Image (cartoon, helix red, strand yellow):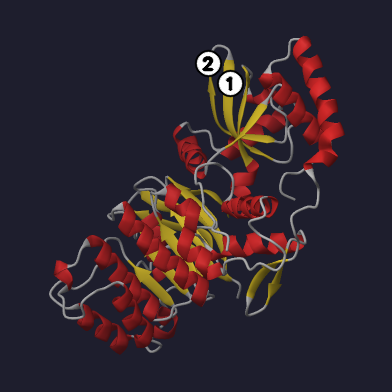
Amino acid sequence: MNQVIEASHLSKKYRSKFALSDCNISIPKGHVVGLVGPNGAGKTTLIQIAVGLISTYDGEIQVLGGSPGKDSEHISKVGFVAQDSPLYNQYTVGDHLNFGKWLNPNWDQESALARIERLDLNMKQKVGSLSGGERAQLALTIAVSKRPELLILDEPVASLDPLARRTFLQFLMEDVASNGISVLMSSHLVSDLERVCDYLIVLVSSRVQLAAPVDELLLNHKRLICKRRSASELPNNVEVIEQSHTDTQSSFIAKVNGQIWNREIEEENIGLEDLVLAYMSTDKANLSSSKVRNLQRKK
Amino acid sequence: MIEFHLDTGTGVSPYMQIIKQVKRALRLGILNNGDQLPTVKEVVSKLVINPNTVLKAYRQLEAMGLAQAKPGIGTFITTSAPEVSPSSFLPLKIELQKWIDKAIKNGADLEIIEAIFQECLRQSDVEETA
């Protein structure tokens, strides 16, 4: 089993509204996967299905080769930190480690303690008095110390200041380096994701708009600038994702398959953030990349 | 020991940035034959990046013949700075100077000269990193 998450035609409907519709995802092992999308796009729904918190849905999903949350053995292989790192405020840091130890068969107390020491946390301190960064780090420590194969994090760094965010991600990346765990994390902070993720899923209005390795995305996507022309007048190895025109100039954010041999079109590299935003807004303009592709083929 | 840094938002993938920095360090003589590159874990921890990115960069450096991995120890540089003295490029430089003067006489400005240069590089298939 080489896929950590494999979903086909996965859908979830709340009353008449789709939270997820027809999602097809296949994530290979050993990746750090970023899940991005506007609020309400279905990120949390996807995550909750993957960890077994939502058990009624249409379509299929396999996590580490089994149904999410099917038995305790399966649950022990998936670490999960929900939004805002839920912990028990009236209990101490030490209590939380003990809970972890009692509940998880593969619990690694030694590394948990080493980590608490490195974070300079006091075992006797009540969790309610920890800072946001410390809470997030404690939640991550617990999730990692159960030695999961897959770690799923829902907006882990959203409420942290830049320094705490960097430290959190540093610990996370060290875990990936030393234990080889796969990670799925949702976030709004694309600049963070560009550093730590090597695979990206963009979810827009309940649909998967994009799912690909980050290196490939950065390599294939360009900003094209030229004298005013319509998308259909571009070479046919170009898939337009976003376009804007003035009376004299056109600029496109596009997927370029191969080289553009045209000196009238200037190519520029584009950062992951602009690229992700372009994919997010394609839906608003009701101009999905596949539609653009079809239009071009017809021409 | 070389220290890497990372610019996000440039559209250059992180692994490519690492490769470029190693090549630059070789050119500048910061790295020499036999020098060890930082371990994957060190780079991950310092830059806060994905370990796969570092591994990919190191593997590419190996494929280019610039580095070699010794299992369990680390990755080491296997080449030295290219042994070319600046003077060996002198005739080329003189020729290029003549060409630039001619271009300016024909009304080309810096941007046009750069564009022509880049296009010719592309035609000759000179790849920056491979």
Question: Residue at position x 51%, y 51% from top?
Answer: B6
Question: Residue at position x 75%, y 59% from top?
Answer: B80
Give the amino acid at mark 2. Thr
Q: Eyeballing the image, is A32 above or below A219?
A: below
Between the C-alphas of marks 2 and 1, the distance is 6 Å
Q: Secondary structure at mark 1?
A: strand
Rendered location of residue B130, percent (x, y): 75, 50
The quadrant of the rendering that contains the N terminus of chain B is bottom right
Q: Are marks 2 and 1 on the same chain?
A: yes
Horizontally, is A73 left or right of A260 in the view? left
Mark 2 — residue?
A246
Mark 1 — residue?
A250
Horizontally, is A50 left or right of A26 in the view? left
Give the amino acid at mark 1. Ser
Q: Quarter-wise, where is residue A111 in the image?
A: bottom left
Is residue A157 visible from the viewing direction of this image?
Answer: no
